[in-house]
Amino acid sequence: MLYRALRVVVRPTALAIYRPEVIGTENVPSDGAVILASNHLSFADSLVIPLTAPRQVSFLAKDDYWTGKGVKGLISRNFFTAIGSIPVNREDTRAAQLSLDLALTHLQEGGAFGIYPEGTRSRDGRLYRGRTGVAWLALTAGCPVVPVALTGTDKLQPVGSRIPRVVRFRVEFGEPIDFTGRFEGVPAGRARREATDEIMAAIHAMSGQELAGKYNERAPEQPTA
Protein backbone atom coordinates (compact mmCIF):
# COMPACT_ATOMS: atom_id res chain seq x y z
CA MET A 1 0.00 0.00 0.00
CA LEU A 2 2.81 2.42 0.88
CA TYR A 3 4.59 1.47 -2.34
CA ARG A 4 1.46 2.24 -4.37
CA ALA A 5 1.19 5.62 -2.66
CA LEU A 6 4.81 6.45 -3.50
CA ARG A 7 4.27 5.25 -7.05
CA VAL A 8 1.18 7.39 -7.53
CA VAL A 9 2.34 10.53 -5.71
CA VAL A 10 6.12 10.66 -5.26
CA ARG A 11 7.20 9.14 -8.58
CA PRO A 12 5.42 11.59 -10.94
CA THR A 13 6.45 14.52 -8.73
CA ALA A 14 10.11 13.48 -8.71
CA LEU A 15 10.13 12.82 -12.45
CA ALA A 16 8.55 16.22 -13.11
CA ILE A 17 11.18 17.98 -11.01
CA TYR A 18 14.29 16.14 -12.23
CA ARG A 19 13.14 15.30 -15.79
CA PRO A 20 15.50 12.33 -16.15
CA GLU A 21 16.22 10.68 -19.48
CA VAL A 22 14.99 7.11 -19.10
CA ILE A 23 15.72 4.56 -21.82
CA GLY A 24 14.85 0.89 -22.25
CA THR A 25 12.17 0.31 -19.62
CA GLU A 26 10.68 -2.27 -22.00
CA ASN A 27 13.76 -4.42 -21.31
CA VAL A 28 12.69 -5.01 -17.71
CA PRO A 29 10.42 -8.09 -17.47
CA SER A 30 7.02 -7.13 -16.07
CA ASP A 31 7.00 -10.07 -13.66
CA GLY A 32 9.15 -12.91 -12.39
CA ALA A 33 12.62 -12.93 -10.90
CA VAL A 34 15.12 -10.51 -12.44
CA ILE A 35 18.35 -8.85 -11.34
CA LEU A 36 19.02 -5.21 -12.21
CA ALA A 37 22.82 -4.81 -12.16
CA SER A 38 23.98 -1.19 -12.25
CA ASN A 39 27.04 0.98 -12.07
CA HIS A 40 27.15 2.99 -8.85
CA LEU A 41 27.88 6.72 -8.65
CA SER A 42 25.78 8.07 -5.76
CA PHE A 43 23.81 7.20 -2.64
CA ALA A 44 20.79 8.38 -4.62
CA ASP A 45 21.17 5.51 -7.11
CA SER A 46 19.07 3.20 -4.92
CA LEU A 47 16.24 5.72 -5.16
CA VAL A 48 16.75 6.63 -8.82
CA ILE A 49 16.40 3.07 -10.10
CA PRO A 50 13.17 2.25 -8.20
CA LEU A 51 11.70 5.60 -9.31
CA THR A 52 12.44 5.02 -12.99
CA ALA A 53 12.00 1.23 -13.30
CA PRO A 54 8.61 -0.01 -14.55
CA ARG A 55 8.18 -2.35 -11.55
CA GLN A 56 9.19 -2.47 -7.90
CA VAL A 57 12.91 -3.08 -7.43
CA SER A 58 14.35 -3.99 -4.03
CA PHE A 59 17.82 -3.10 -2.79
CA LEU A 60 19.59 -4.10 0.38
CA ALA A 61 19.83 -1.36 3.02
CA LYS A 62 21.48 -1.28 6.42
CA ASP A 63 19.07 -2.25 9.17
CA ASP A 64 19.76 1.00 11.03
CA TYR A 65 17.09 2.58 8.83
CA TRP A 66 14.49 0.41 10.60
CA THR A 67 15.69 0.92 14.19
CA GLY A 68 15.56 4.71 14.61
CA LYS A 69 13.35 6.26 17.26
CA GLY A 70 10.82 9.05 17.25
CA VAL A 71 9.29 10.73 14.21
CA LYS A 72 12.53 10.52 12.20
CA GLY A 73 12.76 6.78 12.86
CA LEU A 74 9.12 6.27 11.89
CA ILE A 75 9.58 8.16 8.63
CA SER A 76 12.74 6.22 7.84
CA ARG A 77 11.12 2.83 8.52
CA ASN A 78 8.04 3.63 6.45
CA PHE A 79 10.03 5.05 3.57
CA PHE A 80 12.52 2.19 3.19
CA THR A 81 9.73 -0.34 3.65
CA ALA A 82 7.63 1.41 1.03
CA ILE A 83 10.35 1.34 -1.63
CA GLY A 84 10.91 -2.36 -0.97
CA SER A 85 14.33 -2.18 0.66
CA ILE A 86 15.58 -5.34 2.38
CA PRO A 87 17.25 -4.77 5.77
CA VAL A 88 20.64 -6.37 6.40
CA ASN A 89 22.99 -6.16 9.39
CA ARG A 90 26.27 -5.04 7.86
CA GLU A 91 28.10 -5.49 11.15
CA ASP A 92 27.47 -9.23 11.02
CA THR A 93 30.67 -11.15 10.31
CA ARG A 94 28.75 -13.03 7.62
CA ALA A 95 27.26 -9.86 6.12
CA ALA A 96 28.39 -10.59 2.54
CA GLN A 97 26.87 -14.07 2.39
CA LEU A 98 23.83 -12.97 4.39
CA SER A 99 23.20 -10.25 1.81
CA LEU A 100 23.34 -12.76 -1.03
CA ASP A 101 21.06 -15.16 0.83
CA LEU A 102 18.46 -12.41 1.39
CA ALA A 103 18.69 -11.40 -2.26
CA LEU A 104 18.30 -15.01 -3.39
CA THR A 105 15.18 -15.45 -1.26
CA HIS A 106 13.68 -12.33 -2.82
CA LEU A 107 14.42 -13.63 -6.33
CA GLN A 108 13.00 -17.06 -5.52
CA GLU A 109 9.78 -15.28 -4.54
CA GLY A 110 9.64 -13.74 -8.02
CA GLY A 111 10.93 -10.27 -7.12
CA ALA A 112 13.19 -7.81 -8.91
CA PHE A 113 16.47 -7.18 -7.10
CA GLY A 114 18.93 -4.33 -7.66
CA ILE A 115 22.66 -4.80 -7.14
CA TYR A 116 25.90 -2.91 -7.75
CA PRO A 117 28.54 -5.40 -8.91
CA GLU A 118 31.30 -2.85 -8.18
CA GLY A 119 30.42 -3.25 -4.50
CA THR A 120 30.54 0.41 -3.57
CA ARG A 121 30.28 3.86 -5.15
CA SER A 122 32.87 4.97 -7.68
CA ARG A 123 34.55 8.04 -6.23
CA ASP A 124 36.32 9.01 -9.46
CA GLY A 125 33.66 8.21 -12.04
CA ARG A 126 35.47 5.17 -13.46
CA LEU A 127 33.82 1.78 -13.81
CA TYR A 128 35.46 -0.79 -11.53
CA ARG A 129 35.71 -4.53 -11.95
CA GLY A 130 32.58 -6.45 -10.95
CA ARG A 131 32.50 -8.79 -8.00
CA THR A 132 31.04 -12.19 -8.76
CA GLY A 133 28.12 -12.14 -6.29
CA VAL A 134 25.85 -10.89 -9.09
CA ALA A 135 26.68 -13.95 -11.21
CA TRP A 136 26.22 -16.29 -8.23
CA LEU A 137 22.74 -14.87 -7.78
CA ALA A 138 21.84 -15.11 -11.47
CA LEU A 139 23.14 -18.65 -11.88
CA THR A 140 21.66 -19.90 -8.60
CA ALA A 141 18.25 -18.28 -9.09
CA GLY A 142 18.21 -19.08 -12.82
CA CYS A 143 16.99 -15.59 -13.66
CA PRO A 144 17.97 -12.96 -16.26
CA VAL A 145 20.12 -9.92 -15.55
CA VAL A 146 19.19 -6.49 -16.88
CA PRO A 147 22.31 -4.26 -17.05
CA VAL A 148 21.65 -0.67 -15.98
CA ALA A 149 23.76 2.40 -16.71
CA LEU A 150 23.41 5.56 -14.66
CA THR A 151 24.84 8.88 -15.82
CA GLY A 152 24.86 12.13 -13.84
CA THR A 153 23.67 10.79 -10.48
CA ASP A 154 27.06 11.73 -9.00
CA LYS A 155 26.00 15.36 -9.50
CA LEU A 156 22.51 14.66 -8.16
CA GLN A 157 23.87 13.75 -4.74
CA PRO A 158 27.66 14.07 -4.44
CA VAL A 159 29.49 12.12 -1.73
CA GLY A 160 29.00 13.88 1.62
CA SER A 161 25.80 15.65 0.58
CA ARG A 162 22.49 15.02 2.37
CA ILE A 163 20.09 16.86 0.06
CA PRO A 164 19.75 15.85 -3.62
CA ARG A 165 20.33 18.67 -6.09
CA VAL A 166 18.00 19.42 -8.97
CA VAL A 167 20.03 18.18 -11.94
CA ARG A 168 19.13 15.97 -14.87
CA PHE A 169 20.41 12.42 -14.99
CA ARG A 170 20.14 9.44 -17.31
CA VAL A 171 19.03 5.87 -16.68
CA GLU A 172 19.37 3.19 -19.35
CA PHE A 173 18.03 -0.33 -18.94
CA GLY A 174 19.83 -2.70 -21.29
CA GLU A 175 18.67 -5.91 -22.92
CA PRO A 176 18.33 -8.84 -20.49
CA ILE A 177 21.20 -11.30 -20.32
CA ASP A 178 20.10 -14.91 -19.89
CA PHE A 179 22.74 -17.39 -18.72
CA THR A 180 20.44 -20.44 -18.83
CA GLY A 181 22.39 -23.49 -19.97
CA ARG A 182 25.43 -21.51 -21.01
CA PHE A 183 27.86 -22.72 -18.37
CA GLU A 184 27.08 -26.41 -18.15
CA GLY A 185 30.28 -28.30 -17.37
CA VAL A 186 32.21 -25.08 -16.67
CA PRO A 187 33.90 -24.84 -13.24
CA ALA A 188 31.74 -22.70 -10.92
CA GLY A 189 34.40 -20.07 -10.27
CA ARG A 190 35.12 -19.58 -13.95
CA ALA A 191 31.41 -19.44 -14.79
CA ARG A 192 30.82 -16.71 -12.20
CA ARG A 193 33.79 -14.70 -13.44
CA GLU A 194 32.81 -14.90 -17.10
CA ALA A 195 29.17 -14.07 -16.38
CA THR A 196 30.16 -11.10 -14.24
CA ASP A 197 32.55 -9.78 -16.89
CA GLU A 198 29.77 -10.02 -19.50
CA ILE A 199 27.42 -8.03 -17.27
CA MET A 200 30.06 -5.36 -16.66
CA ALA A 201 30.84 -5.15 -20.38
CA ALA A 202 27.15 -4.47 -21.06
CA ILE A 203 27.09 -1.73 -18.40
CA HIS A 204 30.27 -0.22 -19.84
CA ALA A 205 28.86 -0.20 -23.37
CA MET A 206 25.96 1.95 -22.17
CA SER A 207 27.70 4.18 -19.63
CA GLY A 208 30.89 4.87 -21.61
CA GLN A 209 32.84 5.18 -18.35
CA GLU A 210 36.59 4.81 -18.26
CA LEU A 211 37.51 1.35 -17.03
CA ALA A 212 39.48 1.26 -13.78
CA GLY A 213 40.74 -2.27 -14.41
CA LYS A 214 40.65 -3.17 -10.72
CA TYR A 215 38.27 -3.71 -7.82
CA ASN A 216 36.86 -0.73 -5.96
CA GLU A 217 37.45 -0.53 -2.21
CA ARG A 218 35.03 0.94 0.30
CA ALA A 219 36.08 4.41 1.47
CA PRO A 220 36.16 5.42 5.14
CA GLU A 221 32.89 6.88 6.41
CA GLN A 222 32.54 10.50 5.26
CA PRO A 223 31.05 13.24 7.46
CA THR A 224 27.82 14.57 5.94
CA ALA A 225 27.20 18.23 5.35
Image: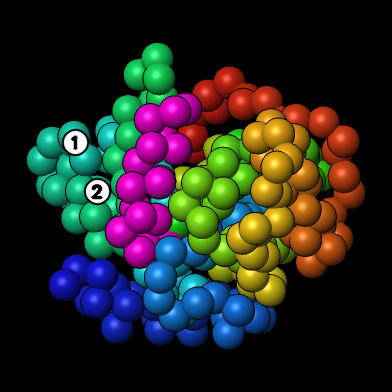
**Does the stretch in magenta take in 168?**
no
Q: Quadrant of residue 100?
A: top left
Residue at screen point 40% across, 46% down: 104
Q: First in sequence, mark 1 or 2: give its number.
A: 1
* Label 1: element kind: loop
Residue at the outermost top position? 93
**Left or right, residue 10 beside residue 190:** left
Closest to the observer: 211 or 136? Answer: 136
Kindly tell me whether residue 153 is visible in this rendering.
no
Q: Main secondary structure of the magenta part?
A: helix
Q: Residue 200 location, x and y as percent?
A: 75, 51
The residue shown at (64%, 64%) is 178
- Give, as a three-letter code, the residue at label 1: Gly
- Magenta region: which residues? 96-112
> Please, what is the three-letter code of the amino acid marked with disc 2?
Ser
Q: Determine whether label 1 and label 2 are within 8 Å by CB.
A: yes
For label 1, the residue is: 68
Tell me the crowding category of disc 1: few under 14, some 14 to 19, or many 20 or more residues within 10 angstroms, Cα based: some
Query: Looking at the image, which is closer to me, 97 or 184?
Result: 184
* Along the line of sight, the residue nearer the viewer: 63 or 224: 63
CA gap, disc 1 to disc 2? 7 Å
Q: Position of residue 6 (x, y in %)?
A: 29, 73
Residue depicted at x 40% and y 83%: 12
Residue 26 left/right relative to 92: right
Location of residue 202 in the rendering, given as x and y in whole percent from the top left corner: 77, 61
- Taking the image as shown, residue 116 lies to the left or right of residue 98, namely right
**Residue tagged by mark 2?**
76
